Amino acid sequence: MDEWVFLFPGQGSQRVGMVQDFLDHYPQQTRGFFNIAQEKTGVDLLKLSLDGPEEELNLTYNTQPALLTLSALIYQVMSSTNSFIPVAVAGHSLGEYSALIAAGSINFSDAVYLVRKRGEIMQDAVPAGNGTMVAVIGLPDQQLEPLIQELSHNGKFEIANYNSSEQVVFSLEKTLVPLIMEKAKSRGAKKIIELRVSAPFHSSFMREAAREFQAILSQISISRPRLKFLSNVTADYANDPEKIRELLNQQMVSPVRWKEIMDRLYQDGYRKFVEIGPGNVLSKLFKREYDQVETRALQSVTALNEWMKEAS
């Protein structure tokens, strides 16, 4: 069997109806996972994921446990069907928790509790409507630093995600959105998109949230990963449980170094990548960065079955 790396998406991949296909084909497993999630969060995430409303699903304290539950479900369906084990795992932001479940480092019930609390704390860190995140695509490299310097004079503005050589995401004050749209475009950006998130993550906006989250993280058991696991904070492998705990906390205030994670995996010889969860953002980023790689996005039962047949 080929060596595949599993990738787990973060916020922005959610959509109403994202669980329906798996509920139709794997009702017992789907309800089992979402029942645990409801016990740990107090929210009927299955109903919310199936029926919405979208604005409620998009609240970060709902988005995070809903996405994690679906990714964990898909991974469980896949591993129980053909006992497939990846060689390495990585997750984007929230997706790190899904990756750690797959690596056997955190159990699902602890993880879904953690990300619900993480979402609540992150949401409360910044009053609704005060902060947001904006993706800037196609900005020439030499224009990035001047853009940051120009905008930082007008308010709080920080890089939150280095997603690829073509895409950078910023956390910023909501009032700066029109300005970044104007300035990034004038400096050559091809596209500027305000993201479907309810707070400005991975930045100093989250400093108080990280302090509060540290106490919750300290209560959770973290084991040594059974698979290679890459951290968003360092873009390097992490295997010490206490170091992982520290990195999960640092991740709230540190940029996601996804471009470097892709580079590291490619340099280490990996060429096959599977995205576990709704959407195909991570697989598309990888393919655009390295056209020699093979990618799959398992966002439907059909895609899952086709890939398992092909990979076995």
Image: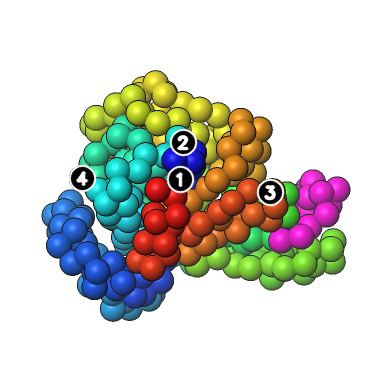
Q: Which residue is mark 2?
A: 88
Query: Looking at numbered disc 3 in the image, what kind of residue is underneath it?
Result: Gln
Residue at mark 2 to residue at mark 3: CA–CA distance: 19 Å
How packed mark 2 is, by other alpha carbons closer than 10 Å (few <14, some 14-19, many 20 or more), is many
Question: Circle 4 sits in a helix, a strand or a loop, which is it?
Answer: helix
**Residue 151 colored in magenta in the image:** yes
Q: Which residue is mark 1?
A: 6
Instruction: Locate residue 298, reporting x and y percent.
Output: 43, 60
Q: Is residue 14 above or below residue 220?
A: below
Earlier sequence position, callout 2 versus callout 3? 2
Residue 292's tag is 3
Instruction: Give the number of marks.
Output: 4
Q: Residue at x 60, y 67 (%)?
A: 194
Residue closer to the observer: 52 or 239:
239
Q: Residue at x 15, y 62 (%)?
A: 28
Question: Circle 3 sits in a helix, a strand or a loop, which is it?
Answer: loop
Query: Looking at numbered disc 2 in the image, what kind of residue is underneath it?
Result: Ala
Q: Residue at x 35, y 43 (%)?
A: 84
Earlier sequence position, callout 3 versus callout 1? 1
Question: Circle 1 sits in a helix, a strand or a loop, which is it?
Answer: strand
Provide the residue span drawn in magenta.
137-153
How packed mark 3 is, by other alpha carbons closer than 10 Å (few <14, some 14-19, many 20 or more), is few
Residue 109's tag is 4
How packed mark 1 is, by other alpha carbons closer than 10 Å (few <14, some 14-19, many 20 or more), is many
Report whether 86 appears left or right of 289. left
Q: Residue at x 64, y 60 (%)?
A: 135
Earlier sequence position, callout 4 versus callout 2? 2
Query: Looking at numbered disc 4 in the image, what kind of residue is underneath it?
Result: Ser
Query: Looking at numbered disc 1 in the image, what kind of residue is underneath it?
Result: Phe
Residue at mark 4 to residue at mark 2: CA–CA distance: 22 Å
